[in-house]
């Protein structure tokens, strides 16, 4: 999600003028001002916020306005590689240190010397890797995997990001409290798109311009986009805009050409609850009454990491609360056919998203309250599906 800020006007070809965050709302303008002040220091920065809000672009904003901007910004997705490979990715390895290590390889920390390293999804690190990262943060020393030479010291600024609640992970014993203190010298919270709807028209215009096509969204279409909940945040908005632009049969996109999920999902007040419970409620409401289908809408969100295992597991729990622990009844509830039963169970087992059905057999546990269904029914919902929902409610 891009941005153009008119505060400073350096050379238009310089790195600082490349597209970044589009900021029109007061929240984002204040965040960018804070990020710019943070760029003047070498303090470690922790960027938090939901998936798809643009935490990586905030990190780039900080780097490109820092004294390290002439040096590289190296990004590492801590959730994309296994624990053993992440150690090699960060610290490097020497030839023969493990199977497949055919040559010496410098780590990302060494490559970021005198620059910035961006540790995305830092909340997905194992406790072992957290300990190794903490040691590096304390002394700046790195030692390649399999190396028996003395450690070398590098000068790297660390910017980390996560969509996890690290305080809750600390309470659950899944994240080191001392590491959080090291990373959170400066804390930036990127608000979700639903809390800064003023940014949506500017973002839509930017995404259209980036495609190079002369396409215009009508005022009614923009209004529907502004009213949508955007659980996938700016990443989801970008996807919808590109889809509409490339599939448009003319130069005007009106409300009727928008996806049914945009036209039917009405805005609701955001409950003041913990973010992950809110996401699960939104997903549940979307599949039950908003016309969303599990394989067509929820599954792609999981694969693209817009929702987490926890979100998926909580969605399943809400479904089981409705079906009183009946996994097979979830198929109709989530818009799947009976033939999908084994596929669905295999998916949940493979990604550790299953919930124990036994706790729902005697009614809904108090800890999992059924969310109030506030979305209008999808025009595509079939009568059979409505009867099924009535039967399991």
Image (cartoon, helix red, strand yellow):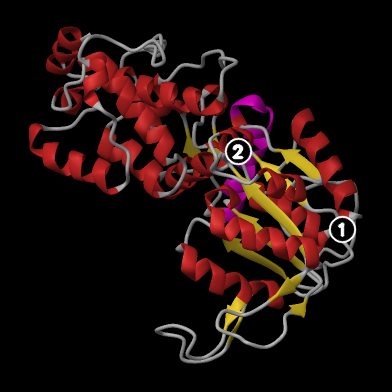
Image quarter hosting the C terminus: top left
What is the tally of numbered marks visible in this picture? 2
The location of residue 183, given as percent across then percent down, is 74, 50
Residue lying at 79% horizontally and 29% vertically, measured from the top left: 26
Are the two marked residues, 2 and 1, in contact with CB atoms closer than 8 angstroms?
no
Q: Main secondary structure of the magenta part?
A: helix
Rendered position, 267 above or below 51: above
Q: Which mark is residue 170?
A: 2
User: Tag 1, which secondary structure?
Assistant: loop
Rendered position, 297 above or below 314: below
Which is more toward the observer, 385 or 215? 385
| Label 2 – label 1 distance at C-alpha | 26 Å
Q: Which mark is residue 42?
A: 1
Label 2 crowd bin: few (<14), some (14–19), many (20+), radius 10 Å:
some
Q: Which mark is residue 385?
A: none
Give, as a single range, the part of the protein colored magenta: 194-210
Residue lying at 79% horizontally and 38% vertically, measured from the top left: 31
Residue lying at 20% horizontally and 20% vertically, measured from the top left: 325
The single residue placed furthest to the left in the displayed view is: 339
In the image, residue 199 lies in the stretch drawn in magenta? yes
């Amino acid at each position: 999600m891009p941005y153009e800020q008119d505060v400073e006007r350096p050379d238009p070809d310089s790195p600082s003028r490349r597209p970044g965050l589009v900021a029109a709302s007061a929240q984002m303008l204040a965040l960018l001002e804070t990020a710019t002040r943070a760029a003047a220091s070498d303090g470690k920065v922790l960027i938090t916020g939901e998936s798809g809000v643009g935490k990586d672009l905030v990190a780039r904003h900080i780097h490109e306005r820092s004294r390290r901007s002439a040096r590289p910004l190296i990004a590492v997705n801590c959730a994309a590689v296994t624990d053993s490979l992440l150690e090699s990715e960060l610290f490097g390895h020497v030839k023969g240190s493990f199977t497949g290590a055919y040559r010496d390889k410098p780590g990302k920390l060494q490559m970021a010397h005198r620059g910035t390293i961006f540790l995305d999804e830092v909340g997905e690190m194992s406790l072992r890797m957290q300990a190794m990262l903490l040691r590096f943060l304390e002394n700046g020393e790195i030692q390649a995997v399999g190396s028996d030479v003395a450690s070398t010291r590098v000068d790297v600024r660390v910017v980390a990001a996560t969509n996890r609640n690290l305080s809750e992970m600390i309470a659950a014993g899944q994240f080191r409290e001392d590491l959080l203190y090291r990373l959170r010298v400066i804390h930036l919270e990127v608000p979700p798109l639903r809390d800064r709807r003023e940014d949506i028209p500017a973002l839509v215009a930017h995404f259209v311009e980036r495609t190079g096509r002369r396409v215009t969204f009508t005022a009614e279409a923009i209004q529907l986009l502004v009213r949508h909940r955007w659980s996938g945040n700016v990443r989801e908005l970008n996807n919808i805009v590109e889809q509409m632009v490339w599939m448009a049969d003319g130069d005007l996109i009106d409300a009727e050409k928008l996806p049914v999920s945009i036209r039917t999902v009405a805005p609701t007040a955001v409950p003041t609850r913990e973010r992950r419970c809110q996401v699960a409620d939104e997903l549940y409401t979307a599949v039950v009454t908003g016309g969303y289908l599990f394989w067509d809408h929820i599954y792609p969100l999981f694969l693209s990491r817009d929702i987490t295992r926890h979100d998926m597991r909580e969605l399943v729990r809400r479904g089981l609360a409705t079906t009183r622990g009946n996994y097979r009844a979830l198929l109709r509830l989530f818009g799947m056919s009976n033939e999908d039963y084994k596929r669905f169970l295999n998916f949940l087992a493979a990604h550790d998203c299953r919930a124990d059905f036994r706790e729902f057999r005697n009614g809904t546990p108090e800890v999992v309250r059924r969310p109030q269904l506030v979305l209008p029914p999808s025009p595509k919902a079939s009568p059979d599906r409505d009867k099924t929902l009535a039967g399991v409610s």
